[in-house]
């Protein structure tokens, strides 16, 4: 059950990356390997640096 939510949250990170014109496959892999929370924070930091 925990694995299901882990992958689901990682898919959310990938979707957020797609919306921000980033590579969703890369961000999905980052979120799965590290954690969805770390992936979300890294994506947020990268998005703020872009502006």
Image (tube, rainbow, N blue to C red):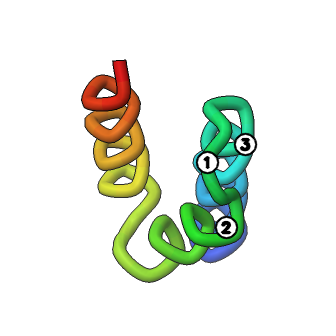
Task: Work out whether residue 35 can be spotted.
Answer: yes
Q: Earlier in the sequence, mark 2 or mark 1?
A: 2
Q: Which residue is disc 1 drawn over?
A: 22
Position in image of residue 33 (x %, y %): 44, 82
* Residue 28 lies in quadrant: bottom right
Question: In the displayed structure, does residue 37 sit left or right of residue 4?
Answer: left
Q: Which residue is disc 2 drawn over?
A: 7
The local secondary structure at tag 3 comes to helix
Q: Is residue 1 above or below residue 24?
A: below
Q: Report if the CB atoms under discs 3 and 1 are less than 8 Å apart.
A: yes
Position in image of residue 42 (x %, y %): 31, 48
**As rendered, which of 4 and 40 lies closer to the eye?**
40
Q: Which residue is disc 3 drawn over?
A: 18
The local secondary structure at tag 1 comes to loop
The local secondary structure at tag 2 comes to helix
The CA distance from mark 2 to mark 1 is 19 Å
Quarter the N terminus occupies:
bottom right
Position in image of residue 30 (x %, y %): 46, 71
Task: Work out whether residue 1 can be spotted.
Answer: no
The CA distance from mark 3 to mark 1 is 5 Å
* Residue 21 lies in quadrant: top right
Q: Report if the CB atoms under discs 2 and 1 are less than 8 Å apart.
A: no
Q: Is residue 12 above or below residue 34?
A: above
């Amino acid at each position: 059950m925990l694995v299901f939510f882990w992958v689901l949250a990682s898919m959310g990170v990938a979707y957020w990356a797609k919306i921000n014109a980033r590579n969703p496959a890369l961000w999905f892999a980052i979120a799965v390997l590290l954690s969805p929370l770390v992936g979300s924070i890294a994506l947020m930091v990268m998005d703020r640096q872009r502006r």
